[in-house]
Image: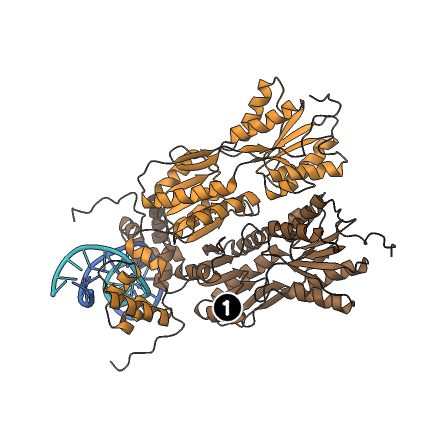
Chain colours: A orange, B brown, C blue, D cyan
Amino acid sequence: MTTQAARDPRRPATQEDVARAVGVSRTLVSFAFRGAPGVSKETREAIFEAAARLGYRQNAAAADLASKRASAVGLYLLDIRNETYAEILSGIRGALEGARNRLVLSVAHSSGGTERAGIESLIEARVGIVIGATLLDSEDHVRELSRSVPVVSVARRIEGVDSVYSDDRMGARAATAHLLSLGHTRIAHFTGPSPFGYQDRELAYEQTMREAGLPPWVVVADDYTQASAERLALRLFDTESRPTAIFAHNDQIALGIREAAYAKGIRVPEDLSLIGYDDSRLARLRGIDLTSVDLGALELGRVAGAAALERLRDPHAPAVDVRSEPSLVVRASTAPPRGSRSR
Amino acid sequence: MTTQAARDPRRPATQEDVARAVGVSRTLVSFAFRGAPGVSKETREAIFEAAARLGYRQNAAAADLASKRASAVGLYLLDIRNETYAEILSGIRGALEGARNRLVLSVAHSSGGTERAGIESLIEARVGIVIGATLLDSEDHVRELSRSVPVVSVARRIEGVDSVYSDDRMGARAATAHLLSLGHTRIAHFTGPSPFGYQDRELAYEQTMREAGLPPWVVVADDYTQASAERLALRLFDTESRPTAIFAHNDQIALGIREAAYAKGIRVPEDLSLIGYDDSRLARLRGIDLTSVDLGALELGRVAGAAALERLRDPHAPAVDVRSEPSLVVRASTAPPRGSRSR
DNA sequence: ATGAAAGCGCTAACAT
DNA sequence: ATGTTAGCGCTTTCAT
């Protein structure tokens, strides 16, 4: 054939191109790149040499299509601007290091669009597994979803679905107990709107309060951001009676409360004890020194990533259920209430 | 055919399945789902109905393959645990809202693996464009890369490549000038190892110092993290002569210096003025009150995302070059040096 | 060890 | 308005 056109340099090289350059069939090239047996040393080397010269890269999508598998990992993140999710992502990334699975990302719409849509997009990308951090839908819906694509739920336990999470009840109990032991009685809990499966911190707080014979006092913000918490706390601090201690659902909320307290001249911890959750880097800064519950987000991500890889390997293994124990990190934002005698 | 097997419920439904269910050809199904003209209303509705019933989802990878386009957006992130990158990602996410492009993520290896490898993985995922935030390779290499896949460079200007960035020289000049105007003369600059294209802050600092007739004093840490900066600052503070003001390459470094100062009993701003860069949320907290340069990361991400979409639409448009102006946000971490008269 | 051929789910001419 | 056919780049039997 005299009309064989020169390869267009903008069009990525294919196995066909490599095969032609070496003078072998496409099959050999495919075999060589997957390390399959049955390719002679010389042929293999010639193939790699030509591939490098032509700038050949595998087309992962085409490979997945042809082999009827789905090697990509889909990741659904509730809020990437929250440091905890960044940590989780970082942990997942670490677990995937080495494994050559693509990571397809879907972040919740800021506009509060449904989680469904985000996950649908992952399914259209034909990921082999979806890691959800964190899923807010009902357990039944998640289980239903997991019938079309395997799911790893991070930070929330879902029966029958791979779950990697921290024991929220334990963390919340420790936080509340710490405030109680300091002598506080007027302890409020700040949280956001509780969707499915996320009432554990609140429930454990309430239970611990009741066990101490104290009335729970739950304040619900519009969402889980610092700004909302700050607005709400400002209003709360205007009322006659305010709590002497607050246990917040997360550090962002705690920091929002802290800002509001500053604005009102309420000192932490002298006038108000404050506990957050997540033990983010902010909590550790001097001048912030926020007592917080460490849930080990990085490790959670790492374990979730490993579980995802494992699930890809064996779709029929029983669902894993990994619960880790959080730990309370006491810093300078908590103290006995004013006027109380030291213990 | 009496042997037509029941559809395996685990195998995702295909256009073929939908077509068969409705009794039309695959083409019509394909047309219907892409909103192409030439499908009667009744047929379209029947198709959608059947698709919903069968749980059909498009296979984006197969569609890309067949149509020879690449609609996925690849994103390379240097450090997801740095809030600034999370902001950039968030901005990109916002720009992609509505557009149904998958976002394939590649995060730099914590182990300092090469940026090449990360981007190779995006190419294997056959993304139509790579957004790099931030690329550390040489300009020539990035330009070479951009011949195999279009690139949008975020936070760094690269000649001939779509670039969306903030004017670092301007920001650094403003920061240094602010310290000078307060009366400082012993002003140090803390930075990390400067790879290609990231010396602007340092260079502008040096130039501004020289113009003021003062000797530049650059301190280079192992990397850009808080921990490294803290270690280095601790050593620096042990020496006889220490600066009265420090301009740090970013907030993380500034915060590391701040921790070291606390540890040594050096007060900010009384004994040491401190300026960061990025104006992260940490900088704004009361008790931190870090003077910082705001580079508008969220907006940078938004513009980069829009530029990526535009590039996907028109591969031959001239490269965009969007430079934004940072602004110095003065807070309580900067003050005149001790013993100086007020201006 | 190597190659031919079928097919993955889809799009895109080109019919009709 | 609807159907036929030929690929996209790859893997995977099945031959040789």
Position above or below: A160 against B227: above
Q: Using residue A93 as the reference point, say whether residue A331 is left or right of it.
A: right
Residue B191, can we see it? yes
Q: Position of residue B39 (x, y in %)?
A: 36, 58
Subunit ID for the residue under disc 1: B
Q: Quadrant of residue A63?
A: bottom left
Which residue is drawn at the image coordinates 54% and 30% (left, top)? A171
Residue highlighted by disc 1: B142
Q: Position of residue B105 (x, y in %)?
A: 47, 54
Q: Using residue A247 as the reference point, say whether residue A103 is left or right of it.
A: left
**Nearest to the observer: residue B220 or residue A265:** B220
Q: Quadrant of the C terminus of chain B?
A: bottom right
In the image, farthest residue toward the top: A213
In the image, farthest residue toward the front: B240
Q: Position of residue B196 (x, y in %)?
A: 57, 66
Amino acid at the residue labelled 1:
Val
Label 1 SS: helix
Q: Using residue A129 as the reference point, say whether residue B253 is left or right of it.
A: right
Q: Position of residue B150 (x, y in %)?
A: 48, 67
Position above or below: A204 against A18: above
Q: Using residue A89 as the reference point, say whether residue B223 is left or right of it.
A: right
Residue B31, can we see it? no
Please state the total of marks drawn on the protein image: 1
